[in-house]
Image (tube, rainbow, N blue to C red):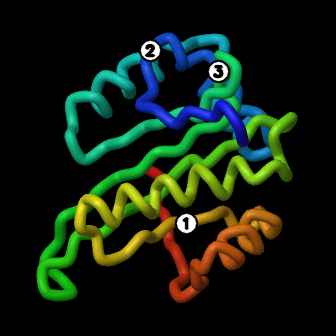
Amino acid sequence: MGDLEIRRATADDLPAIVALLADDPLGAQRESPEDLSPYRAALERLNADANQHLVVAVREGRVVGTLQLTIIPGLSRKGATRALVEAVRVHADERGTGLGTRLVEWAIDTSRDLRCSMVQLTSDKTRTDAHRFYERLGFTASHEGFKLRL
């Protein structure tokens, strides 16, 4: 993993992040790398919220991975704070190198540092390789997720 740096994403990283989001069958249907304006607006909202951590993994000056960590204060579980991991992506050239593990471990460690009592995530039902990956990292498929498109 040598020179890998995990750091907060900047506007200069957006083209690479969006390319990562679009680089699979699901992302190709819902992302628009040719128009970065909605992503710029989203990054501004993320940067304005202290509970949002959009990060990139950079190796040799190139963005090779990304994820978003959201910290969620709550009342349930005796006022527990949870962490939500979203949009984990690793560049095709880096898959199988341990980079995904490093990114998720960063999210877990950061969640601990921020006194979260739980890290949770969702993964599309078709992403069976991702499910095995998360289970290897200790995550349990304990709930059924539901979404309502608005």
**How many labels, in total?**
3
Q: What numbered label is drawn on residue 16?
A: 3
Q: Residue 7 or 79: which is nearer the viewer?
A: 7
Residue ID at (72%, 71%): 131
Which amino acid does the dot numbered 1 rest on? Thr
Label 2 vs label 1, nearer the camera: 2
Label 3 vs label 1, nearer the camera: 3
User: Mark 3 vs mark 2: which is more N-terminal?
Assistant: 2
Q: Quadrant of residue 114?
A: bottom left
Please rate how many residues cluster around mark 1, counting C-alpha atoms within 10 Å: few if below 14, some from 14 to 19, many from 20.
some
User: Mark 3 vs mark 1: which is more N-terminal?
Assistant: 3
Residue where numbered disc 2 is placed: 11
Eyeballing the image, is 74 above or below 56?
A: below
Image x and y of residue 5, in percent: 56, 33
Image x and y of residue 41, in percent: 36, 20
Q: Residue 33 or 138: which is nearer the viewer?
A: 138
Residue 79 shown left or right of residue 88 in the figure: left
Which amino acid does the dot numbered 2 rest on? Ala
Q: Quadrant of residue 93?
A: top right
**Residue 32 visible (yes or no):** no
Residue ID at (13%, 87%): 78
Image x and y of residue 45, in percent: 28, 29
Q: Label 1, secondary structure: give it.
A: loop
